[in-house]
Amino acid sequence: MVDGVSFTVAAGEIVGLIGLNGAGKTSLIDCIAGLARPDAGAVTVAGQQPGSVAARRATGVLLQQPGLPARLTVAETLALFAGLHGVGVDERLAAALGLDAFSDRRVDRLSGGQAQRLALALALQSGAPALLLDEPATALDPLMRRDLAALLGQRRAAGAAILLATHDLAEAASLCDRVVVLHHGQLVAQGRPGDLGASLTDIVLAGAA
Amino acid sequence: MRRLLWANLMATFRNPMALIYGWLFPLIFLAGFWALYGDDPLPLALHAGQFFTITILGSAAFGLPTQMVAEREAGLWRHYALTPAPRWRFVLALVLARAVLLAGALILQHVAARALGMPALPHPVSTTLALIVASLCFLCIGALIGSLVGNVPAVQALGQCIFLPMLIIGGVAVPLASLPDWALPLSNLLPGRHAVVAIQTAVTGTGTRAAGFELVMLAGHGALALVAAVILFRWEPGGRVQIGRRGWWLALVAAAWLALAGLAHSRARPVPAPPDRAEAGMVADYVRGVEAVARVSKIVPEVKAHPQPLPQAGGEPVVPEPQPVPEPVAPTPDLPAPDLDAIAFERLPPDSGLVAPIAAEPPDEALASALARIERQVAKWPPASEWDAVQQVRNLLLIAAVPDLLQMDPLERHLPLLVEAQLQARFGARLPALLAAVALDPQAGSVAARADLPALGLPAHTGAEGPVRGRMMLYAFKLLGRVTGRRVGDPPGPGA
């Protein structure tokens, strides 16, 4: 349950959503993506109601459990979701994420890291101005994490508003312009990582204390 | 939409279990029916309604919800719901892909049934219509199950709760004619019965017009299931369905379903008889003493092959469609006129019975229309223009004999009267001799015209000739009794 949380993510900004397990990060992502409806309060995405067609068009989402079509190949999955978003397959993005090496492999035969790269490609290839990424670095090797950071930097530079939920405090500190710290559904801190007066680890643990 | 449909087709056809359950199992069921009913007068056709319905039930009411729930549990639907594409398209694409799989299964099953001896479909359009309506109905029921339950094992459990009653007391696996009395009213409540009757009427009956009520019932069940599926639909995996305010709508759907079931119960038709395996008997059973066969006749001259003009409904004679009537290649033999006293008409099966029935009442409107259509086709039917008069009589008698074997009630009871009218119009006073010739020597001549019956909208007959020759003999005796005034209707019972 999330309560009393209020923040914005501006264009050209990466905001990190951090907290321990059960802090409410995924619930918040679901509300912003339109998959769950808040009992009270308001959420807008690019000025639209979450879940509306306009909001869905404006948002690229990576869920913690992305739900991929098991019996399609990587290339078929990219083409399918590109079609659903009304865009073409972004071959450069696919290559940047290393998907071209196994584009003919069926999704149910991918490793965890390969599936995560595919899910990332699906979220990013729509070119949406808002990105919701729930644990994007999960199962990625260090090289791919580095490449992901570069990709997100490019999107930020292109004006995307990115909300990134993560456990990885080092990643949040290095990638994010601001962070929002949640604990038990409450907002316990937010601001630039360097302006919070303590390390992110201390803040997260203090919230839990 | 095309991309989504294609993706769903790929997902379906790359799933070995979908192919095993969708395509292999229907063939196994068919083989089972063949093992049980292979000695029917018409192999498999009399059970087509059953095995086609089992295929539809398995694929639509089991396969579809299993796939729906599995994809929802895997989070795929949740992922779809994040895209800007209209959400109904995802469900429609899934259902269409399942429909393609199901259509393939039905075609495969039909091809296999034909290879095992089932005759060609006499009403392919009607059969296709019945299969489509039944498939849509059960796809909607499958969508309802998929919306209602939270995981794949629950699909299996709920599916069995729906599937098994339909199989056992719904006329799908156990024929309606074999059900106890208490089960018949229950079968009216289940769409399986309506599917079986609608398909069977198209395959061995007069087409789907005669099964209009069953088609309406299937459409009703399907529509109500679809409404309930839409009310309960969810993208999120797991857990129990939250009914909440939707309960009122569901109560309305339940009330409409009860009304539909009540209508089905009030309009229930008699249960069709089981396939008729009764023996027709032998010629000696219907003449008085063995010696009577020898003295049954006197010579009558000049029985000609050329048919007379056919009567119209209003009584005016009408010349049939121009058909070249071949000149006899050999003189038509003189035929014996029957010694009617030697024929034991009273031993013939009753007209109101199962074997060789003849209607005592006029046909209703729908049946009269079907009979008129058959009558029009008879005028153009080549076996009805056979140059050999006795063979022509045999061919026409097949129009009554085959539907009798196939238990095509109520048509089977009215066709003998149609045949009688045709024979009288064609042969007039010479008819008794011709009928006697067929009745007294049922093994003579050909019954090949039984394969041409689909031209009349009737099923062809395949397999052994014996049963059909027996029914032909019985109708020859019965019509002989009728046209000579020796036997008109059933003799009065003991209390009459």
Image (tube, rainbow, N blue to C red):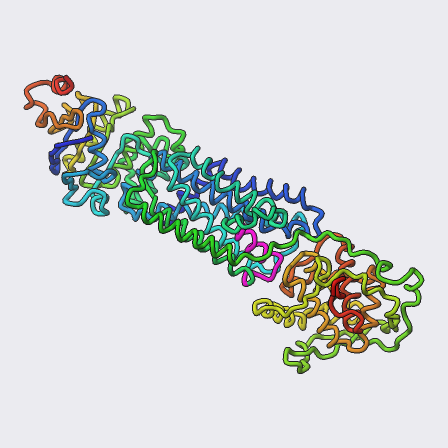
Q: Is residue B222 magenta?
A: no
- Res B335 visible: no
Q: Residue at x 83, y 68 (%)?
A: B436
User: For the C terminus of chain B, which image quadrant?
Assistant: bottom right
A3 on left or right of B331: left
Q: Nearer the viewer, residue B352 or A59?
A: B352
Q: Residue B406, percent across and down?
A: 67, 56
- What residue is shown at x 67% (from left), y 71% (from top)? B380
Residue at screen point 24% across, 36% down: A61
Q: Is residue B51 above or below residue B491?
A: above
Relative placement, left or right, of A33 versus B260 is left
Report the side of B37 relative to A111 (left or right). right
- Give the percent coordinates (x, y) of residue B373: 61, 70
Q: Which corner quadrant of the image does residue B72 belong to?
A: top left
Between B355 and B486, the residue placed more toward the observer is B486
- Which one is nearer the viewer's eye here, B178 or B128? B178
Name which quarter of the figure residue B90 lies in.
Answer: top left
Q: Is residue A165 above or below residue B375?
A: above
Q: Residue B469: x percent and y percent?
A: 78, 59
Q: Which residues are magenta?
A: B193-209
Q: Residue furthest bottom?
A: B316
